[in-house]
Amino acid sequence: MKNNVITARIPEVFAPLLTSCCRIKLYYGGRGGGKSYAFADSLLIKGRMSKLLIACLREVQDSIKDSVYRLLCERISFYHLIDYDIQENKIINRITGSEFIFKGLRDTDIQKIKSLEGVDIAWIEEGQSISQKSWDILAPTIRKDGSEIWISMNRENENDPLWVMLAAHPDERTFVAKVNYYDNPFCPEELKLQAEKCQRERPDDYLHIWLGQPRKSSSAQLICPAMVRRAFEPKNILSVSPLIIGLDIARFGDDRTVFCLRQGRVCHKFITLTHYDTVSIADYCQSLIRDYKPTRVFLDSGGIGAGVYDILVSRGLRRTVRAVNFGSRAIADDRYYNRRAEMWDNAREWLASDLEVQLPQDEDLLKELCSVNKSYDNKGRLLLENKDEIKKRLGCSPDLADAFVLTFAEPVCEQSPPPAVCSIEKLFSDNTDTGKW
């Protein structure tokens, strides 16, 4: 099969994939635009022309079946490209030596991501799911002269990190194009009929699903992005309130253990740990109590959290540490379905306050805080959607947000002199990677 036969199947709008020398090529739009097919076909052509290392990336990839591996295999079969050798976890061109590899960016071993520095082209599929943290690691890693990063995405929210960082105000090295089903001459007639039906019956859904517009803030959303963005803006707030620590403890392999340190209207910072056992988490928590002398530490007692709590109590920290069960009865039981709904709503009220509040600027935090939808039970009490649904939508557990809302578990009155000023200032001056303590 000659390359020009494959090129003829690539809509003209995607020609820059093969011709442009831009460092970043970002295509976005709705369903039926043919982005994935065009990217796969273009990469197969380029892999036949010269030896390339091509990395196919996603935010989360638990197995090869979560990647574009299957799509590439289907296109190789469709075009009868016998020069490609399909192996168990990679694809190699036997003539040029080009190689396709597949990885998730939210990788437990960050060195696996940093090992991509020899990549010629990185294809990021479902770019709307990429976190700022993943991009900050990946962008400087793809450093080879002439290397490119291709991004295909269906926008989800106004604040999708890659959109904000790359597409909202693209520089001269970034090419951005919108492609919808009507731009794709190969769009199946059935998809066009579905789009037209959606336009007639569900116009708002049509704008998002078929025209690629981000979803509007929903009335079901507990916390809106504007609240969080306002809290991100730098302010000069001096607080003498008690220091509170929220501790959300990892339950599963990919989850993170997160400490949130908040003092009144200022949330100072987050500390993230991965792959820490019960004793190590307790040791780290004890060191924070020793260094910063918080008035209270609220920790999630679900899963292994109960074990961490027991260890800390056995070490004489009962006065400082409180175990919180997200599913337990709310303090204001007439207003909230459970403790989780109560804490999240307390956090929302903090963000919505007329008084200025401060959060560390973190796009992952914004995404997590705005991920929760609300409803009400038959008693009119606030009820939040299941955490598994949120995790499915985000691609990860909202650990940063949960640690933050834990600082609102219950009212805290100052019971001793406030921490020394130098102790609080240390929160700002400590630039060490505390997550690797």
Image (cartoon, grey):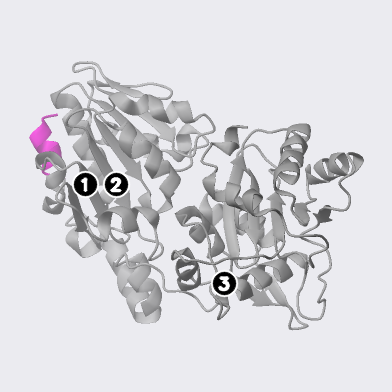
- The tag on residue 25 is 1
Q: Residues within 10 Å of mark 3 (few under 14, many from 20)?
A: many
Q: Position of residue 426 (x, y in %)?
A: 59, 47
Magenta span: 1-9
Q: Is residue 278 above or below residue 330?
A: above
The residue identified by callout 3 is 351
The image quadrant that residue 351 belongs to is: bottom right
Residue 47 located left or right of residue 203: left
Q: Is residue 228 above or below residue 47?
A: below
- The tag on residue 151 is 2
Q: Are marks 1 and 2 in contact (CB under 8 Å)?
A: yes
Residue drawn at 21 percent across, 32 percent down: 147
Q: Position of residue 340 (x, y in %)?
A: 73, 64
Q: Position of residue 403 (x, y in %)?
A: 66, 54
Q: Is residue 268 above or below residue 151?
A: below
Sequence-wise first label, 1 or 2: 1
Q: Amino acid at mark 1?
A: Lys
Residue drawn at 58 percent across, 56 percent down: 268
